[in-house]
Amino acid sequence: MTPKGGQHTWMEVPLPEPPPSLSIPTDRVVIVDGSYANGLYGCALVVQTRGSSDWVWGSTAGTCFNALAAELEAISYAMIWAVDQHVNEVSIVSDSKILVQALNQKKCPDWHLFATFSFVLSLLSSFTVCNFLYVKRCFISNVDKLANESRHSHGRLLISKGRISPESHHPLELIYPELRQEYDAYFYKVFKVYTQVWKFQQENRHKLVETGLKRSEIGDIASRIAQLYFAHYMRTSQASYLHEAFIFYDAILTRDYFNFHSHSNASPHDISLASKHLRFISRFLMVCLLLNRREMVQQLLNQLRLLLDECKRTFKETDFKEWKLVLQELVRFLKYDTNFMNIRPLRYSVVLDTFSDSLSPHNCSRNLRLRDAVLASYHHNEVKFSEVTLDTFRMLQCLEWEPCGSFYQSNLTKNGQNGPSAAPKDILDPTLPPNPRKAVLYRPSITHFLAVVATICEELPPDGILLIYLSASGARYTDTTSPSPLGSVLERLDPSSEQPEECSSALNSGCLHFGTRGNGGINCIYPSDLVPFTRRPLFLVIDGDSNEAFEAINGAAKGEMAAILLSPRSSYHCTSTGSPLHSTGSLFTVFLTAPLQAFCLLLCISDSDVEMDTFVKAEKLISSFLKDWGVKLAASDSLHPVWAQILNDPFLRRLVLRFLFCQAVLALHAPTFNKDEFVPKSLPALPPSFLPSTVLCQTLVMQLANIFGATNSFIFSDSVALPENAYGDTDSMSSS
């Protein structure tokens, strides 16, 4: 049981959301947190010194009157420690925004805290530099756990020393990004320890059970190993780790380690065991969704529903509101991410996506490879599970290799599942290249987004290109009254950023909202925010109704012209389905990830209307045409070098070809014909030989529409006609 395959490098993907990189002016930093309940508090601190892997932690407990007082006790505890250690310069990080603001302004937030607050202010004279910084609680979960344990034990943990362990995101990782480089070494150390523990309990199971080892404790070990595998998949995107996580979670499920009915000595009223069971199912569900194990997802969904009902009956005094929301999210997610949307893998299949391995585009001085991707999506009331939205879920898969590789065999049936002759999903193709690393961000603040992109650009290899996918609604401005909160600052600091007034105005003429409106722009991403990163090769996919503002990026580029795909400004929505907008995800994103299903959605064709033979015929037609388009695109004399340099990357080439297909379909669709706002746009422009008005594009759309009996839904030139050997099965479906 050893980690397998892949190049193990850092990857920033938030499940949960990855921590931001804070600007820490001091070498010594103390992260603190307080926990409060029923008049008791526990507080904890973790200390890290820049450039060192050694860390110090401690905790204490006592009595106070509210949660804010507990947080202040934690800060006081940290400052007393720093004074005792003769530390002259220190930064204190807390998840209490109220206290951080109050201490920086030296104004007591509550008169009940006056005595302790005054004591903390008096300690400031002991330091040359003392900074107070705020960070969200989810980024310091380890310190929060230590504070909770201290409160429950009513005791004090003496200051201790140790070394960083990466069982989960370490809280100090958000402060010193260089610690991420040490992650791999610590991962293997921790993994080795858990492997030894697992082997020891296997060899000594009988003796350990006799001395009191519980089945749930065995499950804890297996679950922790599965979490290690999953966390490493999130950092590296290598499928082998995801499969190993599945194996361990499946073993826990099969052996009922967390089911108290299978525990002879377990109380049916053990809420901690029930909570472990719920957490295990939710984690296993995410792994199964990413692996497209639909049968297992349904099994876990039913088990989650039954377990939650049982918990509500057994623990009547406990509110399971959060778990009810998890269940509702999952049911809604599966309602719209149907089997029809997953008939064929969204991942790149070397069997199904038979494009040329090597092309020789004109005007190409280098070949770039997709190394990293940042995926961010937010729409009001959009479909999501945990912090993965339907759009980012599809894009994430679209940028990975189908793990079975050359072993993949498809025997498609009506419900989209693989038949008996399909290759087992556990067979992995070792010859596949590593997947691009991906960072999935949900509702990122602009500072968080910029920190992630900046870190990736810093590590991007010379032959690498970064893909940034942004899907959100936006706003347009007729002047610059609402510019990016950081754009103007960056321009003032960068002497090379002097731009004509018209260009500067265009860069701030619109934005995408990744959070609630009216918060001062902290969740808004403007085109000017991306300009500093055009020093490195970028591939931008902007899916939003205000994306025309992003056209100005290339006019202000700092050295590398970006390849940009812009969605239509207005999205055509099939009204006969009765589904709300964004319920099935963005149509533009569906075209990029599952083009045939997008074609059906556009024509209001549901999965019950499609015979599998018809679908297979249409899939072969699209694959054949797109393969031919790839060769012709590379041979085009008018292909811009920005596009030529990425055509040899399979993921980016497939996105570009599917974009051309999307452009042709939407431009020729009768309800959107000659309406520019419904047609996507590329910058720089792709060759005119691929415009929707050409015979090349109209032939594909006409033949595809003919297969579904929907030629009347499109407007074609009189010179375009179906060839005699065209695919067709007009009897199988009625015209839409």
Image: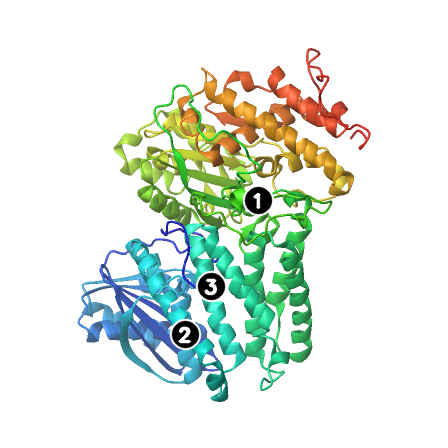
Q: Position of residue 597 (x, y in %)?
A: 66, 37
Q: Quadrant of residue 229?
A: bottom left
Q: Nearer the viewer, mark 1 or mark 2?
A: 1
Circle nearer the N terminus (3, 1): 3
Q: Mark 2: which amino acid?
A: Val
- For disc 2, the neighbor class at 10 Å (few under 14, some 14 to 19, many from 20) is some
Q: Quadrant of residue 135?
A: bottom left
Q: Which residue sits furthest front?
A: 421
Left/right placement of residue 397 relative to residue 73 reads: right
Residue annotated with mark 1: 408
Residue at position x 49%, y 42% in the image:
399
**Marked residue nearer the N-terminal end (2 or 3):** 2
Name the residue at 54% across, 65% down. 249
| Amino acid carrying mark 1 in the image | Tyr
Quadrant (top left, top right, bottom left, bottom right) of the C terminus: top right
Q: How is the image coloured?
A: rainbow
* Residue 267 pos. (x, y %): 60, 85
Q: CA distance from mark 3 to mark 1?
A: 27 Å
Would you name the residue on which mark 2 appears? 197
Question: Height in image: 565 above or below 514?
Answer: above
- Residue tagged by mark 3? 227
Relative to 190, is 238 on the left or the right?
Answer: right
Q: How many marks?
A: 3
Q: Amino acid at mark 3?
A: Gln
